[in-house]
Amino acid sequence: MNSTIQADIDFPSIEPQEFYDKLQDNNSFMILDVRSESVSTEWELDFTNIQTINYHYFDLLDGLPDDLEQQLPEDQEIIVICTKGESSKMITQKLQENGYNA
């Protein structure tokens, strides 16, 4: 696991309307929610056709735990969400460094 952060990597982002359109089009992707459990529960994303995993950002600072990697799809896009955007950038980079489409 590589946990080094490089500031020069360009991160993809998704605007709310684009995210909504993906949901409506039933695109094949999963959501990795890196918000705290309490925030994730309060502002729950409940989609019947989209797999959502909540794994707190702080638990990912040292890399991707094995139990999370076992749940991540290798053949689907992973959209990482957080409260303000910075945490999702860092986790997206970790996923990309480990070969995931994030």
Image (spheres, grey):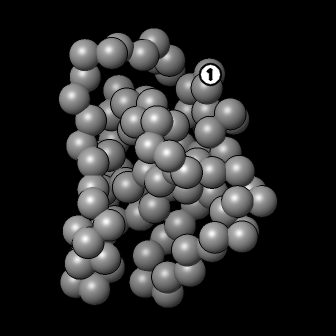
Q: Quadrant of residue 29?
A: bottom left
Q: Is residue 70 above or below residue 63?
A: below
User: Which residue position holds label 1?
Assistant: 62
Asked whether residue 31 appears in the rendered view, the answer is yes
Viewer-side residue, 1 vs 47: 47
Instruction: Please identify the residue farthest to the front as the structure is shown.
Output: 84
**Residue 21 horizontal/vertical position (percent):** 23, 78
Asked whether residue 88 appears in the rendered view, the answer is no
Viewer-side residue, 37 vs 97: 37
Viewer-side residue, 53 vs 66: 53
Q: Secondary structure at mark 1?
A: loop
**Residue 69 horizontal/vertical position (percent):** 53, 43
Instruction: Look at 45% across and 12% down and name the residue there.
Output: 4
Q: Is residue 46 above or below residue 15?
A: below
Question: As shown in the figure, which amino acid type bears the numbered disc 1?
Answer: Asp
**Residue 52 horizontal/vertical position (percent):** 53, 67
Q: Quadrant of residue 42?
A: bottom right
Q: Is residue 63 above or below residue 7?
A: below
